[in-house]
Amino acid sequence: MISSHSDTLHGFNRAMLRTRSTLQFPLRLFFVLPAICTSVLFAQENISIGGYVQTENHVAFDDQELTWSENRLNLKLSAGNFMDYGLFSEVQFRGFGYVQIDSVSMLQGLEDSGSYPGGVELREAYLDLYSFPFNSMDLRLGRQIINWGTADALNPTSNISPNNLEILLDFGEHLAVDAFQGTYYGSRANLTCVYVPTFTPARLPPPGYSSALLSAFSSGMSLPPGVSLEGFTQQVELPQRNLDESSQYAIKLSSFMQGFDLSLSYYYGRYDLPTPCAISMPDSVITLIYPKVQIIGGDFAGAIGSVGIWGEGAVFFPEEVLLDIPGLPAEEMLKDEPYVRFIAGCDYTFGNGVYVNTQVLHGFLHELGRKNLNDYLTFRVERDFLNSKLTLVPVSFAVSVSDRDDPAENYGLAYVPELTYRPVDNIEITFGGAVLHGEGDNLFKQLNDRDEFYVKARASF
């Protein structure tokens, strides 16, 4: 029997909250962990402790649904003599403002079900060894976020650390990976090598947005008559936990020439977003996997006069993925043919303080394969007032075109204005909104009913 769309999303939501709840530490660790960290840090040199407290809430326009509610304590700890070694860690204590209750035992705390979701997340924790194993090389070991590329938030060449899409329109956020990273500093160029032994997938947004992404993944899929993808339960298969199936490798050669930062890179690993590979009709399950891919990329950044410019591009060489549908020929979800994603942009600050940033993008992060690539334009205007106490972003939008032959019926639009107020140093309050609209076959079409208002407040220390 095919499950309903609402049941599927409810199950997904419960699973998401339970996953977060499994990060919770036993209560005694909240007392033991700070004591251990404090004793270790004070045995080191040049100790630095910082972080922030943040609250963020999103409310849908149409039905006033609370789509995101989070309170976060972020702690950043660093130590070392900065000549031989350095230590860095970032820990997030997170609490979510909505609960999942459907029984009295859950109210009594008798079920370990994530009814009060929250937890502790080790965001980064690594050791830097300087001039090791020889003078012109540094080594970084441990959990780290590795961002490559020069574009603003959207980087085709940055594929090592997976995307964090919890808040879908907050692009540029990444998750950490457990990695070995070494950088050799030459006289004319630097060489960086990265090895990641285990695979980490991207983190997806709440159910309403995740279903839109899933629909975008499966664009053009041939399904049996009368079958809707939304009626299926989604099952994800991770790669086997061995070095052959889950390892990632990357290398980058970077240099500075004629006022420009330049780099060439190579990546071997997997996409961090899943692709459908099988549909099981009796139990109404669609299976998704993470295909292997090789990526060759390059980027640049610099300035022409007072105008900052940047660009990057990557050639993707994916493995073939066939969709197995009972009673139908296999559908080719991803061809083993190369395709190109690229982005170029510029920014400029006018004499009156108005800052403008624009980018042109071919191929978004969820678009896999040549036939699924669309074109995008982003444009942002902002200005500070009252000695930078107030920042107004009246114009901030992204436009997509999914069919150049008929753009009027195949387009997408996201308009995201913001206002940020800083009453005192280290405190900022942001009010914003997201208006989403689309026609035809694109991601924004799937998000037509997801307009929302949000407010964020952060105090840094």
Image (tube, rainbow, N blue to C red):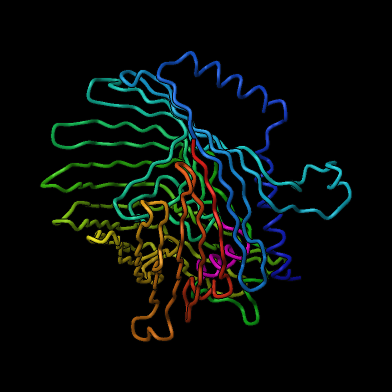
Q: Is residue 34 left or right of residue 392?
A: right
Residue at the outermost left position: 258
Magenta region: 205-218
The location of residue 265, given as percent across then percent down, is 27, 47
Q: Is residue 42 left or right of residue 63?
A: left
Q: Is residue 139 left or right of residue 144?
A: left
Residue at the outermost front position: 386
**Image-quadrant location for residue 313:** bottom left
Q: Considering only vertical position in the picture, is 282 above or below 237?
A: below
The location of residue 173, given as percent across then percent down, is 45, 50
Count of numbered labels shown in the rendering: 0
**Image-quadrant location for residue 385:** bottom left
Q: In which quarter of the image is the N terminus?
A: bottom right
**210 magenta-colored:** yes
- Please tell me which residue is depicted at 58% across the width and 62% down the height of the picture: 210
- Please tell me which residue is depicted at 68% across the width and 37% down the height of the picture: 24
The location of residue 326, given as percent across then percent down, is 62, 71
> Which sits in the foreground, 261 or 390?
390
**365 magenta-colored:** no
Residue at the outermost top position: 43
> Which sits in the foreground, 50 or 250?
50
- Please tell me which residue is depicted at 71% across the width and 68% down the height of the picture: 6
Q: What predominant SS class does the magenta segment belong to?
A: helix
Q: Considering only vertical position in the picture, is 242 above or below 205?
A: above
> Which sits in the foreground, 416 or 371?
416
**Image-quadrant location for residue 392:** bottom left
- Please tell me which residue is depicted at 72% across the width and 30% down the height of the picture: 27
